[in-house]
Amino acid sequence: MNVFFALILCFLLLGCTEKQEPPLESSAVETLGEPLRVCPSRALIIVPPEVHGQWKAVRIAVYDRETGHEEVHTAHIGEEFKFGDAGLSLEVRNFLPHFVMNGLVMTSASNRPENPGTQIAIHDEGEEIYCGWLFSLYPEAHAYEHPRYVFNLVDFFPSEQDDLN
């Protein structure tokens, strides 16, 4: 496994030696299962074998600044839910229980929830207006500044858990 990570890091380092910036394209996701949709970037998201398929859902709080009302939504990884005004939705793309980032590589250091992070995309009338990460321990980190709504990762559920309420 360590050889795999070393090869990926070498590939990334060798790819960075060119003077010209590559065009922005979807980042790669390495998993044991189906490819997942990811954000446009040059980052590589690696879901380690010990994490892949071990987490099924997250709970995200959506706070409306105008009304002062907060709704909490539970969504399976890979699902999308509607919130607020008509046309707004949030898609849960990935979950890493022990999020770590080394250069352009994002992965999970273990399957323990040491630094839980979920990758989300926000859509308005079907158009993606944001894609990034929410962290339960650091809600301010990389926080998306929507003019009306605030988003927070408040919980996460392992695959073996049946009740999501």
Image (cartoon, rainbow, N blue to C red):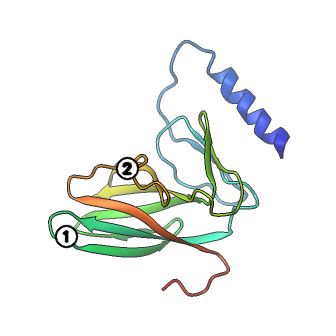
Q: Residue at x 73, y 35 (%)?
A: 8
Q: What's under tag 1, amino acid-wise?
A: Gly
Can you give x and y, in whole percent of width and height, for residue 143 in the image? 37, 50
Can you give x and y, in whole percent of width and height, for residue 43 in the image? 56, 38
Q: Are marks 2 and 1 in contact (CB under 8 Å)?
A: no
Above or below, 155 against 135 in this view is below
Give the mark nearer the N terminus: 2 vs 1. Answer: 1
Above or below, 98 against 63 in this view is above
What kind of element bears circle 1?
loop
Point out which mark residue 143 bears.
2
Q: Nearer the viewer, residue 135 or 38?
A: 135
Q: Which residue is mark 1?
A: 68
| Label 1: how many Cα within 10 Å (few below 14, some 14–19, many 20+) | few
Q: What's under tag 2, amino acid-wise?
A: Ala
Q: Residue at x 35, y 56 (%)?
A: 122
What kind of element bears circle 2?
loop
Does residue 126 appear in the picture of this structure? no
Does residue 104 appear in the picture of this structure? yes
Inter-mark Cα distance, 2 to 1: 19 Å
